[in-house]
Amino acid sequence: MSSAPHLLQTISPIAPPKPRGKVRPSLPAHNSTADVHRRMLSITCGTKRSPDDYHATLRALNSRGRRPRKSFGQHYMLNSEVNEQLAGAANVQEGDVVLEIGPGTGSLTNVLLDKGAIVLAIEKDPHMAALVKQRFSHTDRFKVWQEDFVKCHIRSHMFLLFESISSSDQKPRHAKVVSNIPFNISTDVVKQLLPMGDVFSEVVLLLQEETAQRLVESSLRTSEYRPINIFINFYSDPEYKFKVPRSTFFPQPNVDAAVVAFKLKQAADYPAVSSTKSFFSMVNSAFNGKRKMLRRSLQHICASPEIEEALENVGLPATSRPEELTLDDFVKLHSLIARV
């Protein structure tokens, strides 16, 4: 693999704390001390990637005196093969620019860098941000921002990163997102990223399996069919990739996970609506009264007879409910009743 240009400022390593006497791990180990040392993770340096496993994760956390925080939704991946599959789902290649949300101890980051990617990580936990900053201080293809992703200006960060790439021949037009995200911010992440087809070509996320199925596979006339499904298909082409057992995480969650890939659409490929704000306002209003007929839940937009007529023009019964309409149906209905 050829060396990458100096794209980011070199990050100075953080000196590890000096041990005081005999240090005991604060989290339980599964095997003997000798086995732990054979499989331990090198935090500070190393150009050749070593696999991240249970013991490596514990060592990384112990180096900062940390335990996974429930408030941050922290569940660390223990299986390096899953990280390889996650990166493979996005077809990460040398020179790709990748955004990672919540790098944790850096196990997925390690895989992405090993493939030659330029990685921007967003980490809310200051201790984990410091850990990965130190761990990958040997490469200029990594930068970490200690921020809350759902509150940060990710578009600005990405454009600054694009501008920092020194190759004048061809700057990347789009980046990729590859992340094992905290389950508790899944919907926020999806809503923030999917309309950014001008920045990202695809978004590959490891989600709670139930959430993954609901986002990708929900069918008409089911209780799981919601405005988020309209949103996702408006901005992307989603695909359920593979299931990830709960046993591959530390601490082990109560549910399995799954990987979903969202291929983002360009603005020219979005469904033709006069206003996306008006369109999604109509969709949300329709589902606010999910068991109500649209002629009632959308009365604030226009009178019931007009809604009934519009539904019939779309080819739907005048008594239709929101869970009976596809994305295309909603687009056609909006064009007939919206006052934009």
Image (cartoon, rainbow, N blue to C red):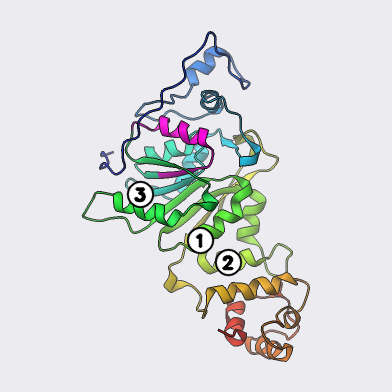
Q: Position of residue 154 (x, y in %)?
A: 45, 54
Question: Disc 3 to disc 1, how far (Cα)?
Answer: 19 Å
Considering depth in this image, is 35 or 294 the residue closer to the camera? Answer: 294
Circle number at residue 69? none
- Residue 216 vs 290, above or below: the answer is above
Residue topped by disc 1: 194
Marks 3,1: beta carbons within 8 A? no
Q: Position of residue 96 (x, y in %)?
A: 35, 49
| Amino acid type, mark 3 | Asp
| Amino acid type, mark 1 | Leu
Please, what secondary structure does the residue beneath circle 1 have?
Answer: loop
Give the residue at x 58% y 18%.
Answer: 25
The answer to which of marks 1 and 2 sits earlier in the sequence is 1
Circle number at residue 96? 3
Question: Disc 1 to disc 2, how far (Cα)?
Answer: 9 Å
Residue topped by disc 2: 231
Please, what secondary structure does the residue beneath circle 2 have?
Answer: helix
Start-end of magenta stretch: 120-138
